[in-house]
Image (cartoon, helix red, strand yellow):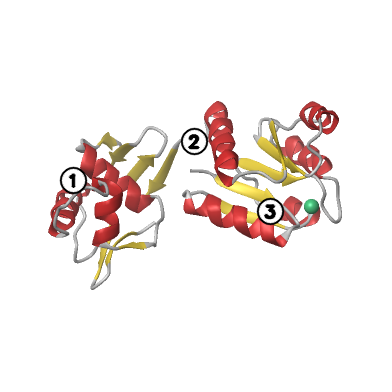
Amino acid sequence: MARILLVEDDPQIGQLVQRFLSSEGHKVAWAKTGREALEAELPDLLVLDRGLPDAEGLEVLKAFRELDPLLPALVLTGRSDEESRVEGLLSGADDYLGKPFSLKELSARIQALLRRAGKEGARRYGALELDFSRQEARLFGEPLRLSPRERALLFTLASAPGRVYSREELLERVWGLEFEGEERVVDAYIRLLRKKLQDDPKAPRFIETVVGLGYRFLG
Ligand code: CA
């Protein structure tokens, strides 16, 4: 889970990538030109198209590297032949992906870059700290002891703060499709989780009940 700056002028690709990476829990800012990119906040990782309307992507990358020499960067390109690959890698990109690419592959490469950069770490929500790569939770700095289901439930909800998950959906995601349980199981586990998070259902800081719909994580 990282702050990603996507620099891409193609509206379709940009929207697709932004949506997909957001659904994976990343915070994605989208710049459509080199100029917009340079005005954006410094991210944890850069995903960069080479052919921008006002700049060559690699020049934009160079400018970012002056601000953060270790900023992980993945370059997208229509020119996927070997020569431009080599050129891209020499000019400082950490990885390279030729269009068309699969979103899954993009995601896997981003994870790998974040891991290498050690930037995949924890996210903080008030007193709660969630480390998505290690699937570890801390409350007031102390590790939370969670059962595997509680852990899966917490990280599922927290992967998309603000999004409402129905009980049915949580059953499917946390217990698996074959599980023939009652949706009340979800409520029971939410209660356990709230207790460990010291979360008051009447004034929730982390997990909110959305009446008639399900639950959501307050990010
Ligand atoms: Ca382009």
Could you tell me which residue is drawn at 30 percent across and 50 percent down? Answer: 173
CB atoms at circles 1 and 2 under 8 Å apart?
no
Q: Nearer the viewer, residue 6 or 12?
A: 12
* Mark nearer the N terminus (1 vs 2): 2
Distance of label 2 from label 3 (alpha carbons): 21 Å
Residue 172 seen in the current view: yes
Q: In the picture shown, does residue 47 fall above or below 217?
A: above
Q: Which residue is mark 1?
A: 196
Q: Quadrant of residue 87?
A: top right
Q: Which residue is mark 2?
A: 120
Could you tell me which residue is drawn at 47 percent across and 49 percent down? Answer: 25
- Estimate the x, y position of residue 134 in percent, counting from the top left: 38, 32
Q: Which residue is mark 3?
A: 40
Left or right of 7: which side holds 90? right
Q: Amino acid at mark 1?
A: Lys
* Mark nearer the N terminus (1 vs 3): 3
Distance of label 1 from label 3 (alpha carbons): 38 Å
Q: Amino acid at mark 3?
A: Ala
Q: Amino acid at mark 2?
A: Glu
Q: In the picture shown, does residue 123 fall above or below 190?
A: above
Q: Quadrant of residue 110?
A: top right
Label 3: how many residues lie within 10 Å, few (<14), some (14-19) or many (20+)?
A: few
Q: For mark 1, give the secondary structure.
A: helix
